[in-house]
Amino acid sequence: MTANNGQKGTLIENIAKFREVGLLGFIIILSVVIQWRNSSFLTWENINDMITNTAILSILAVGMMLVIITRGIDLSIGATLALSGMIAALTVGAFPNLSPILAILLGTMIGLVSGVILGAIISKGGVLPIIATLGMMYIFRGLTFMVSGGQWVSAHQMPDSFKGIATGSFLGINNLILIAVLIYVAFYYFINHTRTGRQIYAVGSNPDSAKISGINHDKIIWLVYTIMGGLSGLAGVLWVSKFASAQGDTASGYELTVIAACVLGGVNIAGGSGKISGIILGSVLIGIMNNALPLINVSPFWQTGIQGSIILIAVVLNALVKRGVDMNALMRRRI
């Protein structure tokens, strides 16, 4: 290998290693430009609203990251969120004195059951994730309309204690932000400092080698979809509490936004790699775009196009960096 090739390989590896630093730099530059266009962007009130609005997205991104790392995808999370949120809303409407904690547990449990079923179909039934999750998306969405009778639950049907889940705070920190932080801390430890966390990466990097080494592939796949379901159920309760409304089409298409946050955060759509720090930044970038584009008077017709362009660029860069790292590793093995 020549010196130039060696330097090129090192550069590519550095880009891959410190990709989050580059993403953070892009976020800072973007924020400065937006602040220049609209001085209200970096006010404390707007920043707090932006982070609060991004909290649910970031929670779902954790579960989606684990799913994508194992070379899977989950298109059913929006429907799972809607089903869990609807049942929680109907329950607190019928029992106004129900503890908010029990409402959260109820929604999370519904999501867990949904995830267990979906994980079994994929891991035990051998159905492709995109097919299984697409089918379950329609089933869960249909169940949402069935349990609600096609009606929606409005704010006046929900007790203040339930709506306070999203609007309340602890030690001056909004509950949504606090819950998101706790989940990120827990899963950072889980994927970086536990055997199961390392096995998730192993399954995504090389499924065949993982099986040979004794890792229970089906168990890992089942686990990640169960986790995704539980987080979707939790997000459903938080969503309904935040917007004080539960509808059959709640969060329709939101799974694509979650996948976008993961891709922007550097999660390899082909599996095997992804970091908690990356999906935090990816979620923040999505939140900034959703908040800032209207502030600087970008036409709604252009907003989705701009977001899509940024996501596409991120995907292309991820692919180029991965190809460069793989080629460099192959050349080193040949020497």
Image (cartoon, grey):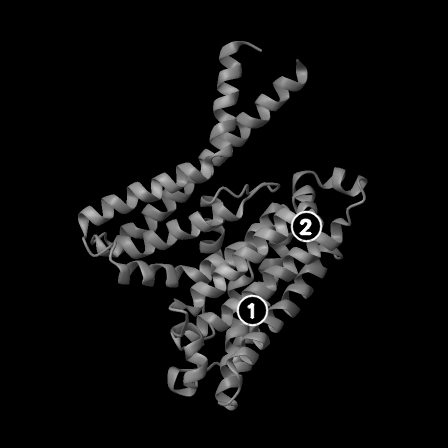
Residue tagged 2: 194
Residue tagged 1: 233
Q: Residue at 23% x, 52% y: name it.
A: 298
Q: Residue at 47% x, 57% y: name it.
A: 58
Q: Amino acid at mark 2?
A: Thr
Residue 229 drawn at (x, y percent): 60, 64
Using residue 302 as the reference point, say whether residue 309 is left or right of it.
right
Residue situated in front as seen by the camera: 320 or 75: 320
Q: Residue at 33% x, 51% y: name it.
A: 289
Q: Residues within 10 Å of mark 2 (few under 14, many from 20)?
A: few
Q: Is residue 54 visible?
A: yes
| 5 up-or-down from 270: above or below | above
The part of the image, by quadrant, that contains residue 28 is top left
Q: Amino acid at mark 1?
A: Gly
| 250 up-or-down from 280: above or below | below
Using residue 3 as the reference point, say whether residue 230 is left or right of it.
right
- Mark 2 or mark 1, which is nearer the start of the sequence? 2
Q: Quadrant of the N terminus?
A: top right
Q: Residues within 10 Å of mark 1 (few under 14, many from 20)?
A: many
The extreme front residue here reads: 171
Residue situated in front as seen by the camera: 206 or 43: 43
Q: Quadrant of the C terminus?
A: top right
Q: Give the structural element (helix, strand or loop) at label 2.
A: loop
Residue 296 drawn at (x, y percent): 21, 52
Q: Is residue 313 visible?
A: no
Give me the C-alpha separation between circle 1 and circle 2: 24 Å
Residue 119 drawn at (x, y percent): 68, 59
